Image (cartoon, rainbow, N blue to C red):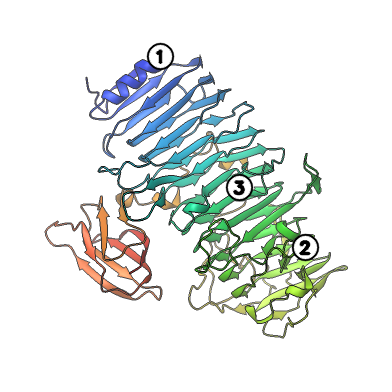
């Protein structure tokens, strides 16, 4: 029997719930009656639509408590929502596992698993070795939003973004789930420190690192997330980590593997958390961003009161043990290369930017083509820039331009250098005239803060950390002085989780016309496939990295194309822009590789 989207069925038995959902042919609302259920296990396999989705929800938000071995599996499904549950399990399975699914939403739940096992709490994966349509492409366009993840005491991740294994071609390939969004969640109390594999979020893994994930992690709050040296571990390519707030967390946001990732507009606060010691005896620090790989952009981030050094400095550039394109061992620490670090604010940290750590001579690959521009660094301790191992001064491998550095107390601008010398174009030492804003609890620029030219011409930064306009002549650091409305302030618990405002949405899916758009494969060779184009589409354009339109395809009479010939384009990174007569429906970065 099928259920229409207007019907609402109520259930207290997991088998009855699964049978009804899997038999539905036109969507529907499936309600689990309030109560506490032990071993509530259900597996769903249903392909719904955007117009008629499947919604599986608690009778009232938080009114259904799932204990024991309770868990959900969503397999080969589309347009399904799980909403309002409290997972208090003690089992050995992921609480929610997605296999080869798309447009699945996990929203307004509470996750607090008590177990001694190593478990990935929410796992987004593919369908391995299943190359039948429509599962020839891995999972995509899933959303995990407005949840609480708390009290993790064992290895495993709060959220894991994985993907599919494909051995149908001449080579075995791993494809990450793509275009997933993790937003407006509250991650807290992850600890104590494990040796490895206890990140709050892990995106990809080493063998998947060359796959483009296009994952967006935004508007999340992380508090006391100490379980792993990497609070968020990015291990794939073409992801965005933006507008998140990290508080009192031992470790860093780590670009561990992969290329072309963007870290933008995040807040990091130490909040007075002291240097700690792990159960194994290692020293624990509150840190910022650690960087490996190529072509990353690190902009508009704010870091205050962090005590990290070595692996955990506010901005960490260690040496590497491999070079991109020269090693097939994807588990290596690939040196940072062609990385832009610009418009970041570091204030009152124990250390600043740290460069050249070689991990006891295990890393010997120098950095290459690093740009450090328009940052603002001030502090009263140690050095604002330190060459950690003095033999590893990177000299001309790093270009410094228009950075404001203002040491106070016992601090110095630079230490450990043997060849790096800052001139007036590299570093300006003058008072930044910051003012403490009690409304947002951050140090902001003032009308007296100096302004410098924006030297980034390839990827100009046109907004600041608060979402205000940044002109060509602007303040260094994350904040540009402005009287515009603040769009992005540090997050509090009122901004995230199940009880946050109902209108909190992801900026990725702000335009519902483009919500289902899928452009693949990544990378593409000769043909680009387009799936789920909006019927309002009137024009498809491909732009190069300079913003020039290199291909334009106009839609006549609603005849939507399913493929584009890109065989004549040079290998490189492009942006596909899809438009309706009124506005842009959506954009997507693609890679052409012949």
Q: Which residue is mark 1?
A: 13
* Label 2 CA crowd tier, 10 Å (few <14, some 14–19, many 20+): many
- Cα separation, mark 1 vs mark 3, equals 38 Å
Horizontal relation, residue 535 to residue 226: left or right: left
Q: Foreground residue, 574 or 559?
A: 574
* C-alpha span from label 2 to label 3: 24 Å
- In the displayed image of the protein, which residue is found farthest to the left? 557
Q: CA distance from mark 2 to mark 1?
A: 56 Å
Q: Is residue 440 in sight in this rendering?
A: no
Q: Earlier in the sequence, mark 2 or mark 3?
A: 2
Q: Earlier in the sequence, mark 2 or mark 1?
A: 1
Q: Secondary structure at mark 1?
A: loop
At label 1, counting other C-alpha atoms closer than 10 Å, the crowd grade (few under 14, some 14-19, many 20 or more) is some
Q: Residue at x 63, y 41 (%)?
A: 198
- Which residue position holds label 2? 351
Q: Residues within 10 Å of mark 3 (few under 14, many from 20)?
A: many
What residue appears at the point 47 percent right and 28 percent down from the top-left corner?
Answer: 84
For the question of whether residue 32 can be seen, the reply is yes
Residue 6 percent across, percent down from the top left? 27, 26
The secondary element bearing badge 3 is classed as loop
For label 3, the residue is: 491
């Amino acid at each position: 029997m099928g259920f229409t989207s207007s019907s609402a069925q109520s259930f207290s038995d997991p088998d009855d719930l699964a049978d009804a959902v899997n038999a539905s042919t036109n969507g529907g609302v499936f309600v689990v009656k309030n109560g506490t259920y032990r071993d509530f296990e259900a597996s769903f396999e249903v392909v719904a639509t955007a117009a008629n989705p499947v919604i599986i929800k608690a009778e009232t938000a938080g009114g259904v408590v799932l204990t024991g071995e309770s868990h959900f599996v969503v397999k080969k499904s589309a347009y399904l929502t799980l909403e309002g549950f409290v997972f208090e399990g003690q089992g050995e399975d992921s609480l929610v596992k997605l296999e080869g699914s798309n447009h699945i939403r996990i929203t307004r739940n509470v996750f607090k698993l008590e177990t001694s096992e190593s478990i990935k709490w929410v796992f987004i994966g593919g369908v391995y070795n299943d190359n039948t349509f429509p599962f020839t492409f891995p999972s995509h366009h899933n959303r995990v939003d407005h949840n609480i993840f708390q009290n993790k005491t064992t290895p495993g991740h709060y959220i894991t973004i994985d993907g599919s294994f494909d051995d149908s071609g001449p080579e075995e390939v791993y494809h990450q789930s793509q275009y997933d969004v993790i937003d407006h969640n509250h991650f807290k109390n992850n600890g104590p420190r494990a040796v490895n594999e206890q990140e709050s979020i892990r995106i990809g893994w080493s063998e998947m690192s060359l796959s483009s994930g296009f994952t967006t992690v935004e508007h999340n709050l992380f508090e006391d997330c100490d379980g792993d040296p990497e609070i968020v571990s990015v291990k794939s390519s073409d992801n965005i980590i933006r507008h998140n707030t990290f508080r009192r967390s031992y470790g860093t946001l780590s670009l561990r593997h992969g290329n072309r990732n963007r870290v933008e507009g995040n807040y990091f606060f130490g909040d007075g958390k002291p240097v700690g010691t792990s159960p194994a005896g290692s020293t624990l620090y509150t840190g910022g961003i650690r960087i490996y790989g190529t072509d990353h952009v690190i902009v508009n981030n704010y870091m205050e009161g962090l005590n990290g050094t070595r692996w955990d400095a506010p901005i960490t550039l260690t040496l590497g043990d491999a070079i991109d394109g020269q090693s097939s061992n994807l588990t290596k620490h690939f040196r940072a290369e062609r990385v832009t670090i610009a418009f970041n604010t570091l204030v009152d940290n124990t250390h600043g930017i740290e460069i050249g750590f070689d991990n006891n001579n295990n890393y010997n690959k120098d950095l290459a083509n690093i740009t450090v521009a328009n940052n603002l660094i001030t502090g009263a301790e140690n050095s604002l820039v330190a060459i950690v191992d003095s033999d590893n001064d990177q000299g001309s491998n790093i270009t410094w331009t228009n950075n404001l550095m203002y040491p106070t107390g016992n601090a110095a601008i630079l230490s450990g250098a043997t060849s790096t010398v800052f001139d007036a174009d590299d570093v300006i030492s003058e008072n930044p005239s910051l003012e403490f804003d009690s409304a947002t609890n951050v140090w902001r620029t003032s009308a007296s803060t100096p302004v410098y030219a924006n030297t980034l011409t390839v990827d100009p930064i046109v907004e600041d950390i608060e979402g205000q306009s940044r002109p060509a002549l602007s303040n260094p650091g994350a904040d540009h002085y402005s009287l515009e409305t603040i769009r992005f302030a540090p997050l509090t618990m009122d901004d995230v989780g199940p009880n946050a405002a109902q209108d909190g949405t992801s900026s990725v899916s702000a335009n519902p016309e483009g919500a289902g758009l899928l452009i693949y494969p990544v990378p593409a060779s000769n043909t680009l496939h387009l799936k789920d184009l909006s019927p309002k589409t009137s024009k498809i354009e491909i732009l190069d990295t300079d913003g020039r339109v290199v291909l334009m395809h106009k839609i006549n009479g609603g005849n939507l194309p399913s493929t584009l010939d890109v065989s004549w384009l040079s290998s490189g990174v492009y942006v596909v822009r899809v438009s309706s007569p009124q506005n842009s429906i959506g954009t997507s970065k693609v890679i052409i590789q012949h």
